[in-house]
Image (tube, rainbow, N blue to C red):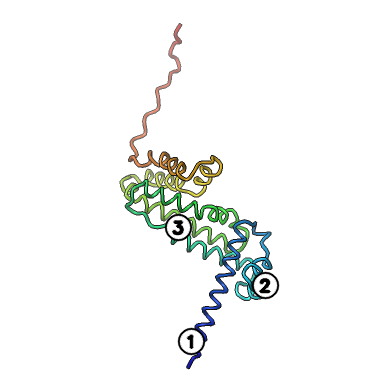
Amino acid sequence: MNRPYQMTGRAAAAERTADRILDATLALWSRTPYDRLRLDQVATDAGVTVQTVIRRFGGKPGLVTAMANRALEGIAAGRADRAGDAPDRVLADLVAHYERYGAAILKLYAEADAAPGLAEVARRGRDHHLAWCASAFADLLEAVPDPEDRARRRAQLVVVCDATTWRILREEAGLSPGQVEQALGELLAPLLVPPGPVPPAPAPTRGVPARP
C-alpha cells in the first residue's frame, strides 16, 4: 500500500542529491578550468561519494554536460521574451541578465570543446540568443524590406546584444552596468533607423590642378 509513496520519496531524494551535485559542479566550474575540475572535490562539496557522482552522471564529461544543460535551461528561462518592448527596456533587462549569467555563458563558449556534449549545449545557447534578438527586435526587422539588408541588420543586432560585447564594455573598459546600458543604447541607435540607400562614392579628384 505504501510502496508507491516510498518510491516517490526515493525518487525525490535522488533528485535532490543530483541537484546538490550539479550545484557543486557549477560552483567549481565557474572558477576552475575543465581540465582541473576533480570529481572528488565535487563529491566533497555535494556531501556524497565519488561513486555516487559516477553512478549518476557517468564521469566528468557527463557531469559537466548535465550541469551545462541545466544552467542553460535556467539562463533561457531568465531571459524573458521582450517582443514589442521599447529598446531601452530590452537593453536594461539584457544588462541585468548578463550581470547574473554573462560570465557562465562566456565560459561555456570558451570551453565548448573541452568535453563531449558541451559543444551542443553551446550551440543551443547561441541559437537561443539569435532567436531572442530576432524576437526582441521583430518590429524593426520586419520594417526592412530587402532580405540582404534585413540579414545584415539582424547580424548587427546580435553583435550589439552579445555577451562578448557586454564583457568588453564591463570588464575591459571598466564601465558600470548603467554605463554599459547607455553604451549599448548608443550602439543600437543607428540600427533603429530604417536603412536608406547607400550614398554614392565621392567623385575622383585626380587631375584637378592644385591651388597655387
Residue at image location 40% in from the left, 27% down from the top: 201
Q: Residue 76: where, in percent of width, then height? A: 45, 60
Q: Residue 84: where, in percent of width, then height? A: 32, 52
Residue at image location 56% in from the left, 41% down from the top: 172
Q: Amino acid at mark 1?
A: Tyr
Sequence-first disc among 3 and 2: 2
| Whole-number angstrom distance, CA of label 3 to CA of label 1 | 38 Å
Q: In the rendered image, which quarter is residue 107 located in?
A: bottom right
Q: Disc number at residue 128?
A: 3
| Whole-number angstrom distance, CA of label 1 to CA of label 2 | 28 Å
Residue at image location 50% in from the left, 61% down from the top: 72
Q: Residues within 10 Å of mark 3 (few under 14, many from 20)?
A: some
Q: Residues within 10 Å of mark 1 (few under 14, many from 20)?
A: few
Q: In the rendered image, which quarter is residue 171 located in?
A: top right
Secondary-structure class at tag 1: helix
Q: Amino acid at mark 3?
A: His
**209 versus 199 height, above or below:** above
Q: Residue 121: where, in percent of width, then height? A: 53, 61
Residue at image location 60% in from the left, 65% down from the top: 24
Secondary-structure class at tag 2: helix
Q: Nearer the viewer, residue 115 or 209?
A: 115
Residue 46 falls left or right of residue 12: right
Q: Nearer the viewer, mark 1 or mark 2?
A: 1
The single residue placed furthest to the bottom in the displayed view is 1
Q: Amino acid at mark 2?
A: Val
**97 versus 77 height, above or below:** above
Q: Nearer the viewer, mark 3 or mark 2?
A: 2
Residue 204 falls left or right of residue 142: right
Determine which residue is flagged by label 2: 50
Determine which residue is flagged by label 1: 5
